[in-house]
Image (cartoon, rainbow, N blue to C red):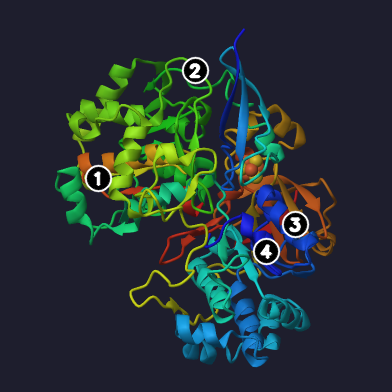
Amino acid sequence: MSFKIVHTICPYCGTGCGINLVVKDDKVVGTYPLKRHPINEGKVCIKGNYCYEFIHREDRLKKPLIKKNGQFVETTWDKALSLIAEKLKEHNPEEIGFFSSARCTNEDNYILQKFARVILKTNNIDHCARL
Amino acid sequence: MTNSIEDIEDADCILIIGSNTFEQHPLIARRVVKAKDKGAKIIVIDPRKTMTAKQADLYLQIVPGTNVALINAMMHVIIKEGLIDEEFIKNRTKGFEELKKVVEKYTPEYASKICKVDKDLIVEAARVYGSAKRASILYCMGVTQFTHGVDNVKSCCNLALITGNIGKRGTGVNPLRGQNNVQGACDMGALPDVFPGYQKVNVAYEKFEEIWGVELNHEMGLTIPEMIKKAGKEIKFLYIMGENPMVSDPDIKHVEKALKSLDFLVVQDIFLTETAELADIVLPAACWAEKEGTFTNTERRVQLIRKAVNPPGEALEDWVIIKKLAEKLDYGDKFNYKSPKDIFEEIRKVTPQYAGITYERLGVDGIHWPCPNETHPGTPILHVEKFLTQDDLGRIFPIEYKNPAELPDDEYPFILTTGRIIFHYHTGTMTRRSKHMINEINDGFVEINPKDAKKLGIKNNDLVKVSSRRGGVAVKAKITENIKEGVVFMPFHFAETAANLLTNPAIDPYCKIPEFKVCAVKIEKL
Ligand code: SF4
């Protein structure tokens, strides 16, 4: 059995509380207070306390899916990405848009806006800050 | 936020507008409680008597959408009673005289008619805020989600500026962000008009052309509401990373039609969301516990997240997916990152506010931007000595009150306002898969004032139909004194009883926020 505690940040609201994840055999099984965190000093709200519960849900997406005759079928990364690349090339820059995410990291957001601007030459990129 | 979460504790007065802090940001509310224990007065302005409103010393139950009238009236009283900070206005701001003229007519009596709040309460709130040594304003979507959202925010700033409540501990104008990395997504330029660090696309494009080594488009792009409006027409291809507009956006029927009319839709997410169901291709992403990177919270603190476990099956980190797609399009050399840290090093180079931040420096405490160099400690409080304007002065903008886009009428006599509840997060993709959260509550509802309920012959838990000009939803009634007469409230987390089937997609002309907080509806017993 392996056991570790990983310090990270709560995935929910913009407060950004520090939180420890308790990891047993590559599964997050609970949270543990991180007392020396400057924002929440070891306390969390109910959402933060149970923030790990969705991680290992059975219905997590595990493979790329492609829609065929209205039904999703599993496909490989290579096929999925090739098809997206092909479809992107078929469109003019001003016909393409990107929704980035307030739930993703800074690095994820940076790379997506760079992708839109550098490769597709479009500034049609936004995220749901307004929503 | 202009200030840090921690320094809220030092305020003598905390004015909370359109934010249910105690339910939505409980660990910020903790600082409010600490301030209160030290004697601070709490003022809450909200159409719903929320858990937060119940903690207030003064509670102003306002008609949704009338914030500007109320704040103008508070400033009217503050000016009349000499509670302004003359030194601060003289040395640090510009525009006070114009403001004075505009707020002249906003007497408490006048505002009281618009906001349906007792005039004496308005006067008292003005006195408490105006005479505090340190007063902090906290606000959330109850200020921004209007067609006049930008005006609302400017009004809050005016109030802080004329009383000198900016640039010190326990003061400031502090938006509380609903999602963990809204601040960071904005900082990173996931916006149609700016590159990372809020550098305008039509001004800073040469700088970025040089850094990225390609020619760039320097015309402003489209916002999400605009892309949805143009879908199937000018917009034919959408790539959606980690968003669920089928639950979060206004007027869902229209969103569904828009997404279905695209040539091609790619959705990259952790679950098969309502939006992913409509996609041509769905890409499995790693969740936050399965990756490294940084989040920037509502007080501008950049913090590290750390990988705890591996993603399930073949799911990949979002940045890895984008990098691989860039390689497919023969741009691998421009996306040559081996880790999130490599990306962050580039972020530092192009984003002046992040220049001094490194993964090594972040540790457990994180760093508040702006942090211009590696020896700079970061900036928990903004505008301490000067504002970020060319002449260093803070701008006071006189604002007139304007009506929301859709007002109640004979056919749709109620105002619907929407929001969140404590147990769920946004569209529920994560929390509605969490056992403890759905045990608490897993159904939508509509809150109705007992007086209105009586007129309509509705009892608690009756099934009612709420309809607007855009659609209708059958949902359980919750009769409660907590909601103002003439106003009803629905949470938006629940796809089956989606409040956003009803909401008005009318947007603020400047920042393009949809008017989630006000639309006209009717209620019928089923
Ligand atoms: S623990 Fe609660 S208050 Fe803290 S970040 Fe998470 S959701 Fe927000």
Q: Using the rendered image, report if marks 3 and 2 lie on a common chain.
A: yes
How far apart, in angstroms, are the residues tagged by discs 3 and 1?
A: 46 Å
How far apart, in angstroms, are the residues tagged by discs 4 and 1?
A: 44 Å
* Along the line of sight, the residue nearer the viewer: B467 or B231: B231
Q: How many neighbours does mark 3 have within 10 angstroms: few (below 14), some (14-19), or many (20 or more)?
A: some
The type of residue carrying mark 3 is: Lys
Q: How many neighbours does mark 2 have within 10 angstroms: few (below 14), some (14-19), or many (20 or more)?
A: many
How far apart, in angstroms, are the residues tagged by discs 1 and 2?
A: 31 Å
Label 3: which secondary element: helix
Q: Chain of mark 4?
A: B
The type of residue carrying mark 2 is: Pro
How far apart, in angstroms, are the residues tagged by discs 4 and 3?
A: 9 Å
Between marks 2 and 4 in the image, the one whose residue lies nearer the viewer: 4
Q: Chain of mark 1?
A: A
**Of pointers 4 and 3, the one earlier in the residue sequence:** 4
Where is residue B413? Give x, y as percent.
Answer: 68, 66
Q: CB of mark 3 within 8 Å of CB of mark 2? A: no
User: Would you place residue B466 above or below residue A47 in this image?
Assistant: below
Q: Using the rendered image, report if marks 3 and 1 lie on a common chain.
A: no
Q: Which residue is mark 1?
A: A117
Q: Which residue is mark 3?
A: B34
Residue B10: give its label. Answer: 4
Label 4: which secondary element: helix
Q: How many neighbours does mark 4 have within 10 angstroms: few (below 14), some (14-19), or many (20 or more)?
A: many
Residue B312: give its label. Answer: 2
Q: CB of mark 2 within 8 Å of CB of mark 4? A: no
Q: Residue at x 54, y 46 (%)?
A: B179
Between marks 3 and 1 in the image, the one whose residue lies nearer the viewer: 3
